[in-house]
Amino acid sequence: MQFIAARPKHVKSFQMQKNRKPQVENNPTPVNILEFDDYFDLEMALPGFKKEELNVEIKEGDQLTISGKPEQVTMDGTIRRREFKITSFERHFPLGKTIDSSNLEARFDNGILQVRLVKREEAKKVSPRTIEVF
Amino acid sequence: MNLIKVNSFLPVHAQMSDAIEVLLNRSVAEIVGSDVVNGLPRANVIEKEDAFQIDLAVPGFERSDFKVDVDKDLLTVKVEKDDGRTDEAKRLSWKRREFSYTSFTREFKLDKQMNREGIMAHYENGILSLQIPKEIKEATRAIEVL
């Protein structure tokens, strides 16, 4: 069987890249962090994980720890091509003083884990107000 | 990813020409990794007794975003979607961006032993799983000798 996957034309076959580690091994859990006025959203791409295999916790007061341990699934068949692996991981994010660590919300949808980190009152961006002059 | 060693004892132009030589003698794909160049979702292929299974790691989509087509020998998985962040991004402040979920097209070539009719797709937890049944070989027929 042959798979073509829009590879560059000068690469003759996938076999040539056999020894090359896929990028996924460099960063198996890519993260996006977006800042809003009142909170940060941290997103982690975790395709293939189930909600119950993930763990989000606050350690030592100000360290957000996200970990995952996939259930071992026995697969009958021969692997013909492997570009990604679903493996255990643990990542830490120091929260600093701006985040209210008692206020954490996490959801997992379609392989994306989203953790909402609410800012402390004093760190929230205050939109400019017009002060009426009497 | 290859790192180019810098020898601080060599003159700068000599180091540069070494670096250029390294670049010219290799394809971009070889240095960066071809899948990274294309930004395509990663796939695992498993051959089972009666079917092939292709698993694509595509987090962040909805089932209805996928378009899976078979045209002769080509199986195409396509998503045309903007992650909605281009407009939003102006208001937002990205502190870190390591992935995005936007449009892609990935093609797989089917071979003779694959049944084009019975292909099934399933999306769960960010994995699109395609099942391609194998063609059932006709039992050898004995031809009667008259």
Image (cartoon, rainbow, N blue to C red):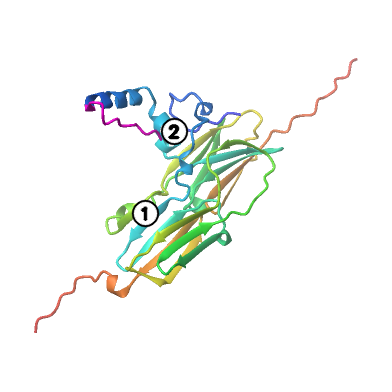
Q: Residue at x 45, y 67 (%)?
A: A58
Q: Which residue is drawn at 37% across and 69% down?
A: A118
Left or right: where B51 falls relative to A69: right
Judging by the rendered image, the residue that carries numbered circle 1 is B84
Q: Which amino acid does label 2 sit on?
A: Ser
- Quadrant in the picture for residue B116: top right
Q: Is residue B127 magenta?
A: no
Looking at this view, name the residue that lies furthest to the bottom: A134
Instruction: Find residue B34 and report its horizontal and vertical position in percent.
Output: 44, 33
User: CA gap, disc 1 to disc 2?
Assistant: 27 Å
Question: Which secondary structure lies at badge 1?
Answer: loop
Upstream in the sequence, badge 1 or badge 2? 2
Determine crowd level at label 1: few under 14, some 14-19, many 20+ residues with C-alpha closer than 10 A.
Answer: few
Judging by the rendered image, the residue that carries numbered circle 2 is B34
Give the residues in magenta. Answer: B1-12
In the image, residue B13 sits, relative to residue A82, either above or below, namely above
Determine crowd level at label 2: few under 14, some 14-19, many 20+ residues with C-alpha closer than 10 A.
Answer: many
Mark 1 or 2, which is nearer the eye? 2
In the image, residue A100 sits, relative to residue B7, either above or below, namely below
Instruction: Specify the subunit that label 1 lies on.
Output: B
